[in-house]
Image (cartoon, rainbow, N blue to C red):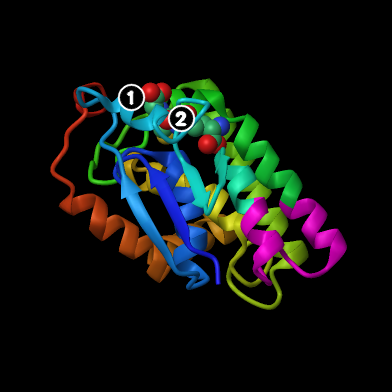
Amino acid sequence: MPNYTLVMGNKNYSSWSMRPWLVLRHFEIPFTEHVIALFEPGHDAAIRAFSPSGKVPLLVDGDLRVWDSLAICEYLAERHAGLWPQDPAARAIARAVSAEMHAGFMALRSAFTCNIRRRTPTTPTPEVQADIDRISQLWTDCRARFGQDGPYLFGAFSIADAMYAPVCFRFQTYGVDLSGAAGVYLATMLATPALQDLSRDALAEPHRIAKYEAP
Ligand SMILES: N[C@@H](CCC(=O)N[C@@H](CS)C(=O)NCC(=O)O)C(=O)O
C-alpha cells in the first residue's frame, strides 16, 4: 500500500499544487498533505528541504520524490487505474490538452492569478481573451468528441480535468462567463466534490499573499 505525502503550496493560491491534490482526492487515494505557506519567511528553505526544483508540488512515496504536477499525475496513473481515459485515442488527446495547459496560456495565467477566495470581475485584455477562447473551444471539442459517458472532458473525471481545475477557479474569480457546452462544463467542475473540498479548505486558510490580493 503506498504511503504518499503531497508537499504543496497554499490551497488558495497554488494552482500547480491543486492538480495532484484533486486527483488524489477525487480518486480516493489515501495521502497525507504537507502544506507550505508560500512567500512567508522561510518558505524557500521549507520547499527545498523536499524539492530539488525549489517548487511545489512534490510527491513523496517512500524514498522516491517526484516533483512537477504533471509528472506526479503520471506517476499516480501508473499505480492506480482509471486516472487517464481508457481508450488510446481519448488518452492521447487527454495528454495533449494536459500538456497544452501545463506549457501554455501564459497571458491568462499571469493576468488572472489564482485566488480562489476572491471575486473581482475583470475585462480580459485581447491576449487573455485569446486564451479564454482557446480553452472554451478545447473544452467544447473534448465534450463533443469524448464526453458521451459522463459530464467531464473525457466522460469520467480524469487527470485532464484536474489540469484545467485552476482555470475553472480563475474564471469564477475574475467573472469569466462561458456559453454552451463550455459553460456547462465549467459549472460541472465547480460543483465537483473534490473542487468544493479544495475551495472550502482555501477559504479557511489564514495566510494572505499581498501581491495576489492587490487590486
Ligand atoms: N511546472 C511546475 C510549476 C511549479 C510551480 O511553479 N510552483 C509554484 C507554486 S504554484 C512554487 O513552488 N512557487 C514557489 C517559489 O517559486 O518559490 C509544476 O507543474 O509543478
User: Is residue 19 highlighted in magenta?
Assistant: no
Quadrant location of the C terminus?
Answer: top left
Whether tag 1 and tag 2 are in contact, CB under 8 A, the answer is no
Residue 174 visible in the current orientation: yes
Residues in magenta?
A: 74-94
- Depth check: 160 or 174 in front? 160
- Residue 153: image x %, image y %? 64, 61
**Residue marked by disc 2:** 55
Residue 177 visible in the current orientation: no
> Which SS class for mark 2?
loop
Image point (53%, 61%), residue name: 185
Image point (45%, 25%), residue name: 54
Image point (73%, 66%), residue name: 85
Query: Above or below — where is 128 with respect to 140?
Result: above
Cβ of disc 2 within 8 Å of ligand 1? yes
User: Is residue 77 highlighted in magenta?
Assistant: yes
Q: Residue furthest bottom?
A: 149
